[in-house]
């Protein structure tokens, strides 16, 4: 996207993969909740989140050591003009689906059309910006765009490729559990039991073993995904040796509860994986489509009433710093104080629509760490009064006498989020707000959040060093009322849309950074989420037989790190 790829045309492997890593071994990973679908490309159903990383591939693959850089995977070559109005790919002759059939241009064109219409809504944005896809040779095609959007050439290279022979004439959007999509990836689903486990087996005939992008990756022969009712049961299974590796997101638990016998014996290792990626946003999101959260003053009051310092100390020992903006912990984050330079120039045309603090500077409140949070409660009461809510007989009510009341919707297997909500609710009740915590199973939780059927709920949106078109799906106006979109808060802001447009149109890196920082300001000052803490390093406890390379990607941990670049060493 900017400059040149870091690796030469004859590179041997990705820099964070060990090209001679041994193959073999079996591991078991644990998930909470359940699943009722094995098709990760449609909106319907709950799918094991890791599945698409193991079983399917795209024309190109991302290097997790370089933002905005892709390398050939199913495609052996790529061509783009200076204005990036089209992109052309030539397929590798050896590319095969797991059933042994070759990947053809027909499969590629069919996949783009199918995903753009019947696939998950996250695929529709690209489909709407494609003017035509034409075959230009036995193994080549050209995709022409109808929009001036420099990132589209990269997005076109990252769509999963499906088998036309499997899906043509069938109801893709409503596929049953038994309709397991055939992919080209290193693993196949070899066995499963609904809601309990999925068995993934490395395909011995995998076509891409010697492709440089794949060399030294997907080294473990067998990966089983076991499902548990909640995180507590999963942790006990790990301690008992039923799970091979576990990611831990609570710093205090990492420091105090990983002291069981297998760790003392050295059979289980604690590894910390640093990264340079943005914090993203984790917290309780407020649904602005319905009152009371359609008023920014009420949203700010909820942020003031969240006693972060006390809750963080209680649940994590105060070890994890707070998220301060959507892109915090990176060079893309908004800068403290008033907007200046290119950021100010981008935001000024929208000044009349921006919420207080966007141009002037916005920062989250800090409490004294005590349980009562007097300063935050006083600030929240003042904001609620401005919004027309006053205490009447110990309860916040509006001029019509209606109480300030809402529900926090949570998945019943999310024990840490429930603990956070319990502490939060106790503070809100002192404020006179009537709050209930509603828990539901993972399938109902997914269905309700997909339909935006909640007042407040848990929200996690990971962000990368290369934000692009997906930002429209996260908080663009068109996604605000699109079921299944990631815009849970319902942002419908011309300023947000304008900053995304500026980001996508940027031709130089400094223009891009300014646009992202401006977007970060609008989102953060929008007060859509009550932010929690961030994770500045990945924390993975794993059996000693699981090894990983000495060189780490700048993105740190993720499914493209563990287990993709790991190997099993029985010695």
Image: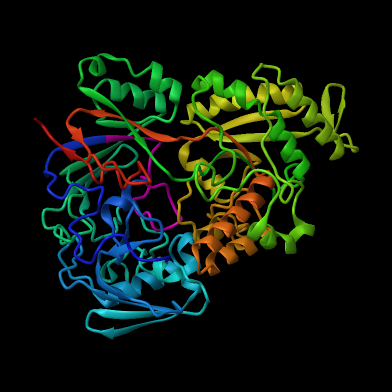
Q: Position of residue 153 (x, y in %)?
A: 41, 71
Q: From this viewpoint, is residue 418 visible? A: yes
Q: Residue furthest bottom?
A: 136
Q: From this viewpoint, is residue 287 visible? A: no
Identify the residue at horizontal 31%, vertical 72% (top origin): 108
Q: Height in image: 539 above or below 314?
A: below
Secondary structure predominantly adopted by residues drawn in magenta: loop
Of residue 478 and residue 527, the one placed in the foreground of this image is 527
Of residue 118 and residue 116, the one placed in the foreground of this image is 116
Residue 437: quadrant of the picture: top right
Q: Height in image: 485 above or below 420?
A: below
- Say whether residue 346 is left or right of residue 538: right
Q: Position of residue 477 (x, y in %)?
A: 64, 61
Residue 230: quadrant of the picture: top left
Q: Position of residue 355 (x, y in %)?
A: 75, 50
- Say whether residue 492 is left or right of residue 256: right
Q: Height in image: 256 above or below 88?
A: above
Task: Locate the C terminus and report the quarter of the image it occupies.
Answer: top left
Q: Position of residue 379 (x, y in %)?
A: 79, 30
- Say whether residue 189 is left or right of residue 151: left
Q: Residue furthest front?
A: 341
Of residue 69 and residue 531, the one placed in the foreground of this image is 69
Q: Which residues are magenta?
A: 29-48
Residue 277: quadrant of the picture: top left
Identify the residue at horizontal 30%, vertical 74% (top origin): 78
Identify the residue at horizontal 45%, vertical 26% (top origin): 250
Q: Residue furthest left?
A: 571
Of residue 88 and residue 84, the one placed in the foreground of this image is 84
Task: Locate the N terminus and report the quarter of the image it occupies.
Answer: bottom left
- Say whether residue 138 is left or right of residue 427: left
Q: What colour-coding does the image apply?
A: rainbow
Reply yes or no: does residue 5 show up in magenta.
no
């Amino acid at each position: 996207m900017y400059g040149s790829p870091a690796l030469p045309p004859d590179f041997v492997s990705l820099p964070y993969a060990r090209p001679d890593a041994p193959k073999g071994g079996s591991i078991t990973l644990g998930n909470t909740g359940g699943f009722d679908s094995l098709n990760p490309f449609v909106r319907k159903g709950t799918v094991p989140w890791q599945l698409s990383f193991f079983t399917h591939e795209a024309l190109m693959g991302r290097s997790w050591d370089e933002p905005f850089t892709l390398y050939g995977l199913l495609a052996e070559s790529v061509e783009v003009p200076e204005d990036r109005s089209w992109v052309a790919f030539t397929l590798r002759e050896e590319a095969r689906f797991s059933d042994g059939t070759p990947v053809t241009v027909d499969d590629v064109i069919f996949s783009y059309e199918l995903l753009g219409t019947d696939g998950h809504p996250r695929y529709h944005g690209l489909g709407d910006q494609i003017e035509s896809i034409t075959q230009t040779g036995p193994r080549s095609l050209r995709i022409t765009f109808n929009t001036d959007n420099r990132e589209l050439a990269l997005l076109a290279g990252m769509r999963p490729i499906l088998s036309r022979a499997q899906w043509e004439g069938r109801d893709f959007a409503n596929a049953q559990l038994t309709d397991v999509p055939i992919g080209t990836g290193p693993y196949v689903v070899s066995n499963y039991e609904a809601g309990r486990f999925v068995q993934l087996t490395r395909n011995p005939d995998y076509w891409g073993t010697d492709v440089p992008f794949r060399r030294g990756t997907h080294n473990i022969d067998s990966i089983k995904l076991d499902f548990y009712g909640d995180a507590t049961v999963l942790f006990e299974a790990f301690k008992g040796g039923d799970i091979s590796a576990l990611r831990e997101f609570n710093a205090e638990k990492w420091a105090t509860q990983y002291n069981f016998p297998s760790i003392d014996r050295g059979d289980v290792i604690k590894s910390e994986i640093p990264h340079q990626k943005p914090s993203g946003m984790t917290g309780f999101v407020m649904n602005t489509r319905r009152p009371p959260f359609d008023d920014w003053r009420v949203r700010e009051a909820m942020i003031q009433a969240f006693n972060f310092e006390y809750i963080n100390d209680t649940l994590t020992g105060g070890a994890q710093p707070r998220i301060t903006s959507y892109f915090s912990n990176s060079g893309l984050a908004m800068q403290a104080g008033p907007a200046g330079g290119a950021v100010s120039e981008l935001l000024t045309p929208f000044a009349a629509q921006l919420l207080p603090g966007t141009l002037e500077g916005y920062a989250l409140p800090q409490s004294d760490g005590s349980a009562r949070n007097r300063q935050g409660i006083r600030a929240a009461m003042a904001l609620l009064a401005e919004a027309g809510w006053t205490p009447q007989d110990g309860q916040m009510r509006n001029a019509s006498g209606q109480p300030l009341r809402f529900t926090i919707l949570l998945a019943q297997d999310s024990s840490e989020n429930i603990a956070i909500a319990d502490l939060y609710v106790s503070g809100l009740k002192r404020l006179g707000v009537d709050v209930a915590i509603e828990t539901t199973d993972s399938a109902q939780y997914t269905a309700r959040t997909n339909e935006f059927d909640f007042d407040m709920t848990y929200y996690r949106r990971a962000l990368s060093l290369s934000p692009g078109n997906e930002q429209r799906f996260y908080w663009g106006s068109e996604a605000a009322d699109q079921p299944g979109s990631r815009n849970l808060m319902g942002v419908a802001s011309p300023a947000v849309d304008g900053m995304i447009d500026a980001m996508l149109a940027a031709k130089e890196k400094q223009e891009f950074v300014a646009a992202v920082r401006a977007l970060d300001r609008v989102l953060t000052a929008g007060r859509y989420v009550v932010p929690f803490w961030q994770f500045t390093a990945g924390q993975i406890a794993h059996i000693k037989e699981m090894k990983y390379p000495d060189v780490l990607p700048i993105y740190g941990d993720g499914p493209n790190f563990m287990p993709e670049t790991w190997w099993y060493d029985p010695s």
